[in-house]
Amino acid sequence: MLSVQEEAIVVAFRRHTLLPLDDCLYALLPTIPHLTRPSLHRCLQRHGISRLPEVTGDKPAKKKFKSYPIGYIR
């Protein structure tokens, strides 16, 4: 179980870097050697930051496939 100080480190690190779970784990292991993936995930869930925010930006618009008649062979 993580102490209050360790949880504060994890939460601050995640909010600052916005790294995925595994990347956070590998970056924090030297600082918190007994940290496991499940305990990291539970900590992030407790603080409401287990999911990364959706990135909004210049995404290409989704296009539909061209419609062909049934049996069409190119």
Image (tube, rainbow, N blue to C red):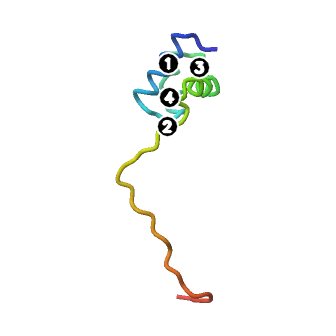
* Label 3 or label 1, whichever comes before in sequence order: 1
Point out the frontmost of discs 3 and 1. 3
* Label 1 or label 2, whichever comes before in sequence order: 1
- Mark 4 and mark 3 in contact (Cβ < 8 Å)? no
Q: Nearer the viewer, residue 20 or 58?
A: 58
Q: Which mark is residue 47?
A: none
Q: Residue at x 55, y 32 (%)?
A: 50
Point out the frontmost of discs 1 and 4. 4
For mark 3, give the secondary structure: loop
User: In the image, what residue type sits under mark 1?
Assistant: Pro
Cα separation between marks 3 and 1: 9 Å
Q: Which mark is residue 24?
A: 4
Cα separation between marks 1 and 4: 11 Å
Q: Residues within 10 Å of mark 2 (few under 14, many from 20)?
A: few
* Label 3 or label 4, whichever comes before in sequence order: 4
User: In the image, what residue type sits under mark 2?
Assistant: Leu
Q: Which residue is mark 2?
A: 52
Cα separation between marks 4 and 2: 12 Å
